[in-house]
Amino acid sequence: MKIIETKNAPAAIGPYSQAIVIGDLVYTSGQIPINPASGQIETKDIKSQAEQVIGNLSAVLDAAGSSLEDAVKTTCFLANMKDFADFNEVYAKYFTGKPARSCVEVSALPKGALVEIEVIAAVKKS
């Protein structure tokens, strides 16, 4: 088991890792739309927040030797299911391999975020 940590994504807010690699898979923790440079959520709309989340995930996956293209499963949490269409528009630009996915509405996300995503992805063979 290998713990993944990168400064190109937000540091963990609690006692967990950004991701764990075990075998040929990487399991990311959920990412919210925190800008890693400022440590803050800087946008208020679902599309911009989804872009930031996916950028954060991309950085974590890269540090693990993987990428968005290698995603096999995502779990997406939305603060409001009314944002589903706008969220999907952004999601579809990046997860072009169409991984398996669950997408649910939750009552609240950390720091008032509108979206959180976690990913399971294949690790590239060296």
Image: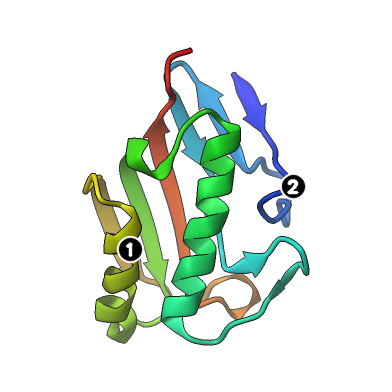
On-image quarter of the N terminus:
top right
Which residue is drawn at the image coordinates 49% and 77% (left, top)? 48
Residue 7 is labelled as 2
* Left or right: 5 as drawn, with respect to 27: right
Measured from the top left, where is residue 22 in percent x and y? 50, 21
Q: Which residue is mark 1?
A: 91
Residue 107 visible in the picture:
no
Residue 108 is labelled as none
Which residue is drawn at the image coordinates 45% and 69% (left, top)? 50
- Looking at the image, residue 15 lies above or below residue 10: above
- Image quadrant assignment for residue 121: top left
Three-letter code, disc 2: Lys
Check disc 1 and report its element: helix, strand or loop.
helix
Which residue is drawn at the image coordinates 55% and 87% (left, top)? 44
> How far apart, in angstroms, are the residues tagged by discs 2 and 1?
23 Å
- Looking at the image, residue 7 lies above or below residue 125: below
